[in-house]
Structure formats: C-alpha cells, structure tokens
Image (cartoon, grey):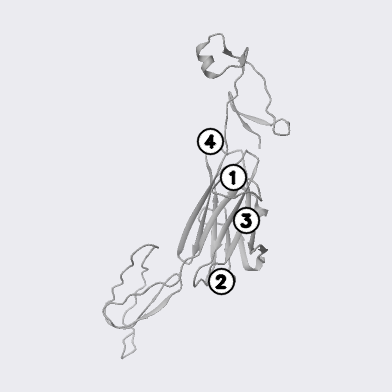
C-alpha cells in the first residue's frame, strides 16, 4: 500500500519458487511502498521502502525417512529380501521441523508386485499409539496415483515440537506379479504446504536353476568337457522349505516356475 494514502498500488500473486540449496530468488516490485511476502513454510515479513531488502526463511520443511524389513521386529534398512507370499514391513519416520503449523501428508506408492495390507497402518509417537482423531487415512479417490495417504492433521502438527518424530508403520505382501531378479519399489512422498520430499525402498526376490544329471553329480565345467555327462530329461524333483514342507509352485513357462501366492 502507498505509505501516505493507504491505497493499494499493486498486487503480485504469481508464486516464486525457491528450493533448498538455492541461493534465493528476486521479486521486482513496480513502485515504492510496503509489501508483504509470505512463504509456504509460514514466514511473513513486512518489507520497507529500501531499494534492496533481503528476506531469510526461518522455517523448515518436515523430513521423512523410509525403511523396510522382512520381519516386523527385525532390522530396517533401504532393502529387504522376500519370497512371493511373504510379508514385508515398512516404517516412515516423519520428523517435525521449525515453524510447522499445517497438515503433513505422506503419499505412499507401491509397485504392482506389492499388495498393501490395508488393516496394518498404524501411527505412533515415542512408542505410543497416536489417536485416530489426530490423523486420517485415505485409500480410494486418490488423484496422484499413490496407493494410500496418511495425513497428520494441522491441529496435531501444532502440538509437535521441533524434531519430534512420528512413525507410520504398515505391511505389504509380495504377490504373484513380482518378477524374480527385479526390484519391487515402495516410494513415499511427503507434502507440507507446497513443499515436497521423496524417499524409496526396494524388495528383492530371487530365482535359481535346478539341474539334474544322468549319472554322478557334475559341475558345469565337467559337463562341458565330458560328453558322457548329460542333462537328465523328464526329471522330477521337490523343493522343500526349512521345515521340510513342499513348496507349492506355479508354472510360468516351460522349465520356469514361480512360488505360488
């Protein structure tokens, strides 16, 4: 507004984008006056009539750390190994930051080889269950292609102190669409106001070959040198798990099978 008359001279509504690590951004105003600059992280500063004014952002965006484990109480890391039909367990640690007073949403996207266990989602803080009044879950009507969303409501975020950690836990099952030797990814995206961060974990499943020989056991190099050592056609075999129970298989194509889901 004009300092003397109080009338509005100009309004700039186009957003200026500045990312973490950038040196800054410049806003050029058409005339002298008092201008207000607000940010998506909540800072609000009044600028005077000086020729050049610098505004430093004091608030920061919340952060996330995503990890996965093949057992619920095991070691969590960036990767896990699983077999089709097995459950894998995820946790996302959301760390509060300075000046947060708006809702924090975690968007989670699973590749087609993973099936979310919809009833497994929980939210804790300091090992204590967070009341469902403080957050919401959404698994349908999602517009960004994710599998589900968990939103920490603004009223709850306002009660958090800087560096408080809220943990979102859930599980998924490796399904029959998982491809041996290919990573099944689970990607999360944290949004706060107009700011975004991302993180990712992978689950691996493996394949192996079974060879049956006509005669004594032989290594590959022996097979190549000795014409008397031949693969045995029409061989039958069983795969047993660690408890000596048969592993059920589904035929994918000739000479290739996968574990049944």
Q: Quadrant of the image for the C terminus?
A: top right
Which class describes the residues within 10 Å of circle 1: few (<14), some (14-19), or many (20+)? many
Q: Secondary structure at mark 1?
A: strand
Q: Name the mark nearer the viewer: 2 or 3.
A: 2
Determine which residue is flagged by label 1: 114
Mark 2 touches mark 4? (CB < 8 Å): no
Secondary element at tag 4: loop
Q: Residue at x 57, y 42 (%)?
A: 113
Name the residue rendered at 54%, 51% in the picture: 109
Closer to us: 139 or 238: 238
What is the x, y in percent for residue 166?
59, 63
Q: Residues within 10 Å of mark 4 (few under 14, many from 20)?
A: few
Instruction: Give the Cα separation between the discs numbered 3 and 1.
Output: 16 Å
Across and down, in percent, residue 20 comes to 40, 63
- Looking at the image, is mark 2 or mark 3 earlier in the sequence? 2
Say which of marks 3 and 1 sits in front.
3
Mark 4 and mark 3 lie on one chain; the one further toward the N terminus is: 3
Circle 3 packing at 10 Å, graded few (<14), some (14-19), many (20+), is some
Q: Quadrant of residue 204?
A: top right
Q: Earlier in the sequence, mark 2 or mark 4?
A: 2
Q: Which residue is mark 4?
A: 181
Location of mark 2 (residue):
161
Q: Residue at x 62, y 13 (%)?
A: 216
Q: Which residue is mark 3?
A: 169
Find residue 104 and report its image quarter: bottom right
Task: Return the disc, 1 or 4, that comes first in the chain's sequence.
Answer: 1
């Amino acid at each position: 507004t004009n300092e003397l008359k109080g009338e509005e001279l100009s309004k700039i509504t186009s957003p200026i984008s500045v990312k973490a690590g950038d040196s800054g951004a410049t806003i050029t105003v058409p005339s002298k006056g008092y201008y207000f600059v607000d940010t998506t992280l909540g800072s609000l500063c009044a600028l005077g009539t000086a020729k050049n004014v610098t505004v430093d952002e004091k608030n920061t965006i919340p952060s996330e750390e995503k990890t996965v484990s093949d057992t619920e109480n095991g070691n969590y890391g960036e990767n896990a190994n699983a077999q089709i039909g097995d459950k894998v367990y995820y946790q996302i640690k959301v760390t509060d930051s300075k000046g947060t007073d708006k809702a924090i949403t975690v968007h989670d996207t699973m590749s087609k080889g993973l099936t979310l266990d919809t009833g497994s989602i929980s939210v804790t803080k300091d090992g204590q269950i967070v009341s469902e009044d403080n957050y919401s879950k959404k698994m349908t009507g999602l517009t960004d292609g994710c599998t589900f969303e968990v939103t920490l409501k603004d009223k709850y975020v306002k009660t958090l102190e800087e560096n408080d950690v809220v943990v979102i836990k859930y599980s998924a099952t490796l399904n029959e669409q998982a491809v041996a030797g290919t990573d099944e990814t689970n990607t999360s995206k944290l949004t706060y106001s107009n700011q975004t961060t991302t993180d990712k974990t992978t689950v691996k499943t493996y394949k192996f070959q079974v060879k049956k020989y006509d005669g004594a056991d032989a290594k590959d190099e022996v097979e190549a040198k000795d014409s008397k050592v031949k693969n045995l056609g029409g061989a039958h075999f069983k795969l047993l798990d660690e408890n000596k129970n048969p592993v059920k298989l589904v035929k994918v194509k000739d000479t290739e099978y996968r574990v049944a889901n």
